[in-house]
Image (cartoon, coloured by chain):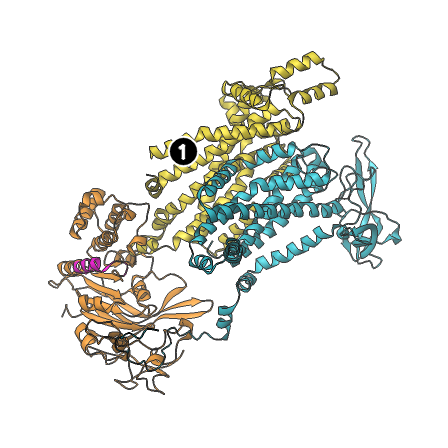
Chain colours: A cyan, B orange, C yellow
Amino acid sequence: MSTAKTSPALPQVEEAVPVVALPDLGREAEAIYVAPNWKLVWWRFKKHRLALISGVIIIFIATIALVPDFYSTLPPQESDAIRSFVPPQRPRFFGPNGEFMYVYEVTGQRNPTTLMMEWVADEAKIAPIKFFTPGYEYEIFGVIETDIHLVGLDNSAGVQKFHLLGTDRLGRDQWSRLMAGTQVSLSIGLVSVLLSIILGVLLGGISGYFGGWIDMIIQRIIELLQSLPPIPIWMALTAALPRNWSVEQVYFAITIILSLIGWTTLGREVRGRFLSLREEDFVVAARLVGASQARVIFRHMVPTFSSHIIAASTLAIPVMIINETFLSFLGLGMRPPAISWGVLLHEAQNLQSIALAPWLLIPGLAVIITVLTLNILGDGLRDAADPYS
Amino acid sequence: MNNTSPLLSVRNLKTYFNLDEGTVKAVDGVSFDVLPGQVLGIVGESGCGKSVTIKSLLRIVEKPGEIVGGEMLFRSGSAAGPGPNGQAGEDMIDLARLDARGKQMRSIRGGEIALIPQEPMAAFSPVHTVGNQLIEAILLHQPVGKQEARRIAIDRLREVGVPAPEERIDAYSWELSGGLRQRVMIAMALSCHPKLLIADEPTTAIDVTTQAQVLNLLRVLQQQHHTAIIFITHDLGVIAQIADHVVVMYLGRVMETGPVDDIFHHPKHPYTKALLQSIPSVQAQARTQLPTIAGTIPHPFNRPPGCSFNPRCPDAIPGACDQHIPALHPVDDPQPVSCFLYHDMVDEEVAVR
Amino acid sequence: MAQYILKRLLLLPLLLFIFSVIAFALIQAPPGDFVTSYIAELAASGSAMEKAQIDALREQYGLDRPLYIQYFKWVGKILQGDLGVSLDWRKSNLELISERLLLTLMLGGFTLVITWSIAIPIGIYSATRQYSFFDYFFTVFNYIGIATPTFMTALILMWVAFKYFGASVTGLFSPEYVDAAWSWARFVDLLKHLWLPALILALDGTARLARIMRANLLDELKKPYMEMARAKGMSEWRLILKYPVRLAFNPLVSTLGWYLPLLFSGSLIVATVLNLPTIGPLLLRALIVQDMFLAGVIILIYCLLAIVGTLLSDILLAWLDPRIRMEEA
């Protein structure tokens, strides 16, 4: 402490004058002041009624994807040559014998001219339907064995099978196949987006954080990938997959193929964020305090746009779902015996099939609903997380 | 009689914004007069409602804001300026009653009342040349052809001191410096010889030297064209330089109004006094604390009852100031003030928050 | 301005080179080569080939040489206009592609015109009459339009047309015009068939573009120059059309960069479902039967179309927005 002569002391300040007086906002506003970011996002999101409803629907669809067999009525792979092209059997309510829900059994006759089976609902034969009935056996997550299904026939009437959404050419129950397909379609969308996120954040982050020639190279790669027309490339890549690969191999190959071009959008955005964040004071401050590069990146920079990533990803999933569906629809993606919505729609490829069995188009409806709700959900998340985007 | 009857007479203007969270009373009973050829300065802190007031005048308040009460009487019609009784048959139109998008209001806007906005950079479209926008303003209000309009535009640019106006007219706004942009903006505002010019903080976005030039320019032009000016600012120094008459606003209400000299040398309202005291001055005693106004501006949803300044007023009278709203009084006085220190409750409004 | 275009054009050969390498790599991906599939097909139809013949074929296509030589042979042939022969169709690829390419381009162009003519007014209306019934209606329409995959729309419309109108909407020509030479009558026939696929394609594009236009316009409507223009006394519609619409146009033009490739890819899907004679279904079939030369050429064409889209949008954008021209100068 220096004892050198100092200038005359400043006049005493009477009392501490508050530099900034916090405005008196009241209890509610104060809660907003101190809430952590995710809570703010959640509160904003809650206001968006439509997005909330969509979220609920998605959760429901996700449960189908998790345990499709519970929702199915018949084994999805089981074919029945006789019961080909059975039309959907509409569930009816409050039957004559006091049943809550039932369907009419169908009887088939072979048309002598066209040699096709024609099915007519027989109003005399009533097949009651119950909830939580035993059906075919399956395993939940491959571990728990059970045979309870959401809906099923009450076997008292002696009727063996019913088809809520009809059957296809090989007599396979479309409802059960729809449930089974949900698992593949949804998960492919999810996994390929996850891969895209990893690639995008990694490469985009490296590019934006380090700058210089790394940035230049990665930028050029991104530009190149983005200028490629994705669909012909995907078609060529999936067509190249050997015919004798197993379902799992094809599954992973497709997710990788889809994410190879899909990561670029996210990569670009992440790079942009990193570039601008690099100059921010709080980053410089963290470095000055001695934080390592990794810590600065993951602890300080990434959390600022993590909600944006989540919102962007939610919007990317439906795109991937559509892509896989359409590739499988063309016969290039997932193939039988795998079941996805696209594989199901492959059966409905031409006018003849549709004219004969329009119910084969119903998996398309599943696609539309899923994509619609995911889009609304993603929009709601984006508005809540990133109102300035 | 003509020169003392006001060009614009605002009486008890109220403009409210109906938001989901509540109603913001941005302008809550503002009254003032503007005489022809006069420079009226409106001074106040951010959020006091000065911008909304002039937007109300021009009828360009954005939704969800709307004028809910009061009147704005404007002497529209023939050209401004002192002169023989061409004023015969001229009425005062209440701008509040006109259809905001209708022909009459549109002809007044830009033609008789012109605006110089706060940020000249943002106020120009970046993909059209400044000339295009200047000529557009001329064509909107004057019955001339395109060639003639271009000639007029170049003259205007020359008048405001833009060098090489024949070339500058085809430039884009982002090619010009801040000061030049402001000049072009002034040229555009004056192009149709308005009776009233509204300048919304025209000196805020530019540096001090340019500021002096712009103020000079405005004064010269004002004297030449005998245009009345409403000058909005929070800078008291600028007010002292340019204004004839001052209106002091706080939280949507007029605290005090009067001739500039009186306001500066004999301020009445405690708020005015505090404002004047808080100007840093070269002549003040060194190393003393700069006096500030205690407290902060209340949140718009949290208006204090009674006089809006009372929580921060050093001379507040408990029981009166926090319950009743003082009116601007006395009306015939050259320097009316809304403060119970100077008058009792004379046909007051009882405070309703 | 010319400088700007020139710089972009110079990049083109480099991009094309890279694309050709990628296309070549893609067609090499399936196991086996060109000749293997040909032999397999022949075997399936009952005939066989002698080893000498097989070797001769291999040499003709350079399949016994290292990959990079094959590549140069391939590129060399293409640059000379020899696109190879399709073993599947027994025709020269050039012949196969040329008319289909023309039809692809026409379909694309038609769709573009429809899309923009519908999307822009919708976007403007939605932005200026926010929260009106029409706005909500379009928002719903938008959401559903984006959620419905193009092939679903095609399938559904195909079914509806068949079931309720008894019409078969496949193909682009009536039977009598399919192989005929070009004439005015043929052109009219084409238009009669073209509108449905173009409409289906336009659905998705319109939904996206209208939404973008609306969002851009909403942004611009809040800007200060709007207030200034109003303060000058302009009438509402005039000022909306002159200023924010003009400014909102710019990002719209830049969407051409990704929209055009999307358009051509989308036409591939619709063409497959409706069985149109464009290059899309040709590619699909080529990939399935591993007619790789044809596939490679078509992929290259798609890449080219994609770059053209970006180039076009960049040039248009520079023309529309003087700020960009200045930046590049």
Q: Is residue B29 magenta-colored?
A: no
Front residue of this view, candidates C86 and C184: C86
In this rendering, does residue C169 appear at all?
A: no
Q: Residue at x 67, y 28 (%)?
A: C31
Magenta stretch: dominant secondary structure: helix
> Which percent across, then down, holds residue C61?
60, 17
Front residue of this view, candidates C97 and C196: C97
Which class describes the residues within 10 Å of circle 1: few (<14), some (14-19), or many (20+)? few
Above or below, C205 relative to A54: above
Tell whether A131 sits left or right of B102.
Answer: right
> Which percent across, then down, holds residue A271?
48, 48
- Provide the residue designation for mark 1: C8
Under circle 1, the secondary element is helix
For the C terminus of chain C, which image quadrant? top left
Above or below, A356 relative to C217: above
Tell whether A262 sits left or right of A161.
Answer: left
> Which percent across, then down, holds residue B254?
29, 74
Q: Is residue B207 magenta-colored?
A: yes
Q: Which residue is most to the bottom?
A: B319
Q: Amino acid at mark 1?
A: Arg
Task: Name the image quarter holding residue B351.
Answer: bottom left
For the N terminus of chain C, which image quadrant? top left
Tell whether A116 sits left or right of C180.
Answer: right
In this rendering, does residue B117 appear at all?
A: yes
Chain of the residue where label 1 is placed in the rendered structure: C
Above or below, B274 relative to C138: below
> Which percent across, then down, holds residue B324?
35, 83
Q: Residue at x 52, y 51 (%)?
A: C139
Front residue of this view, candidates C323 and B107: C323
Tell whether B94 sits left or right of A50.
Answer: left
Question: In the image, which residues are magenta?
Answer: B204-216
